[in-house]
Image (spheres, rainbow, N blue to C red):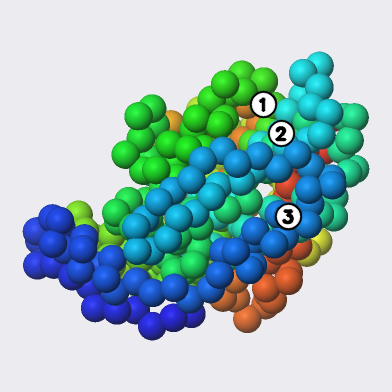
């Protein structure tokens, strides 16, 4: 992981424009969206309809086209699945797990399920290995109507017309050591609040929607992932990242109240994955494989439980 720059601002005071500008000036490009993501999307053009659903223009930092993979021969008579990755750009296996699923497994669902895969929702953040967009906004707190976050607004516009048709949505994320060393302290500083340390779970877990928990669905995903990598145990107080564990490796959030990506559809089966790439017990390939296994298990369950 990269070194954390100094955090702008005055303790106890929320950031203004000057602090956001200072924070943005600290961010530098560390990898290439074009070379690592767009090349792989382009290689899938024969298998998928590649649609550009928007573009974010960040001035001197670059213009980023936003792409999704859509089943060729989309059939409205079939159920639909939405797979999203890279909502937080630094969460690498979310992006590459989505692409791995699309390349290796999507053909298994032909004529059974329509697929819509948005593998890298936040490309500026992907390149800078960061959680936020250039305006210091967290895309995964801004999936709302008239969103101020361009990346969230673009995906919202793509998905909302299909929201009632989508049967399953799986949003691929990671929990990393830098959540605690960099991003949570920056969040506290941005909001003018004291930083309260927390723990990082060692292993894979799921965040279900408290409004649509679907416990058997969550358990099926964890069972599939457990064959690839380990499931995170609860902390001694029975929580993971401060939230009560409702089943092994499962916590719940109110998706829509928080503006989370996995709340943008009416799908009965929804979940957010969390892989731990910094574990000594997991490799980057295992993390990608775990994400792909989670997607397959989610789609299989949805097909088996119409």
State the residue in front, 203 or 27: 27
In primary-sequence order, the first of circles 2 and 3 is 3
Measured Cα–Cα span from mark 1 to mark 3: 25 Å
Q: How far apart are the two marked residues, 2 and 3, measured between alpha carbons?
A: 21 Å
Seen from the viewer's position, the closer of residues 183 and 31 is 31
Q: Is residue 16 above or below residue 19?
A: above
Is 143 on the left or on the right of 25, as rendered?
right
Left or right, 201 with respect to 183, comes to: right
Which residue bears the numbered disc 3? 42
Along the line of sight, the residue nearer the viewer: 106 or 173: 106
Q: Secondary structure at mark 1?
A: strand
Q: Residues within 10 Å of mark 3 (few under 14, many from 20)?
A: few
Locate residue 278 relative to residue 200 in the image: left or right. Answer: right
One can see residue 39 in this view: yes
The residue singled out by tag 1 in the image is 166
Residue 231 screen position, x and y as percent: 66, 61
Q: Is residue 55 above or below residue 282?
A: above
> Is there CB contact under 8 Å for labels 1 and 3?
no
Dot 1: few (<14), some (14–19), or many (≥20) neighbours within 10 Å?
Answer: many
Evaluate if marks 2 and 1 touch, with contact meaning CB atoms under 8 Å apart: yes
- Which of marks 3 and 1 precedes in the sequence? 3
Q: How much space separates mark 2 and mark 1, taking CA atoms?
A: 6 Å
Residue 140 seen in this snapshot: no
User: Looking at the rendering, in which quadrant would you find the C terminus?
Assistant: top right
Marks 2 and 3: CB-CB under 8 Å? no
Task: Name the foreground residue: 29 vs 185.
Answer: 29
Instruction: Name the residue at 13% across, 67% down.
Output: 9
- Any mark on residue 81, and which? 2
Look at 16% across and 63% down and name the residue there.
Answer: 19
The earlier-in-sequence mark between 2 and 1 is 2
Vertical placement of residue 299 versus 175, above or below: above
């Amino acid at each position: 992981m990269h070194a954390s720059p100094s955090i702008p601002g005055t303790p106890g005071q929320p950031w203004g424009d000057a602090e956001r500008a200072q924070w943005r000036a600290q961010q530098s490009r560390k990898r290439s969206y074009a070379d690592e993501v767009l090349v792989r999307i382009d290689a899938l053009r024969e298998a998928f309809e590649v649609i550009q659903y928007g573009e974010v223009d960040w001035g001197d930092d670059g213009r980023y086209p936003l792409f999704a993979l859509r089943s060729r021969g989309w059939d409205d008579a079939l159920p639909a699945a939405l797979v999203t990755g890279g909502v937080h750009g630094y969460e690498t296996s979310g992006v590459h797990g989505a692409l791995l699923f699309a390349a290796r497994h999507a053909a298994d669902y032909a004529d059974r399920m329509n697929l819509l895969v948005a593998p890298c929702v936040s490309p500026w953040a992907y390149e800078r290995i960061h959680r936020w967009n250039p305006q210091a906004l967290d895309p995964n707190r801004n999936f709302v109507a008239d969103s101020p976050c361009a990346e969230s607004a673009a995906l919202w516009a793509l998905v909302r017309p299909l929201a009632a048709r989508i049967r399953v949505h799986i949003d691929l994320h990671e929990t990393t050591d830098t959540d605690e060393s960099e991003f949570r302290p920056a969040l506290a500083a941005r909001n003018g609040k004291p930083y309260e340390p927390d723990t990082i779970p060692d292993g894979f877990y799921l965040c279900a929607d408290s409004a649509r928990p679907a416990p058997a669905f969550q358990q099926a995903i964890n069972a599939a992932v457990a064959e690839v990598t380990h499931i995170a145990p609860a902390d001694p107080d029975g929580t993971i990242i401060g939230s009560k564990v409702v089943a092994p490796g499962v916590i719940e959030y109110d998706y829509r109240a928080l503006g989370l990506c996995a709340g943008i559809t009416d799908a009965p089966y929804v979940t957010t994955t969390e892989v731990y790439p910094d574990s000594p017990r997991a490799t980057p390939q295992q993390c990608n494989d775990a994400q792909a296994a989670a997607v397959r298990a989610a789609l299989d369950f949805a097909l088996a439980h119409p």
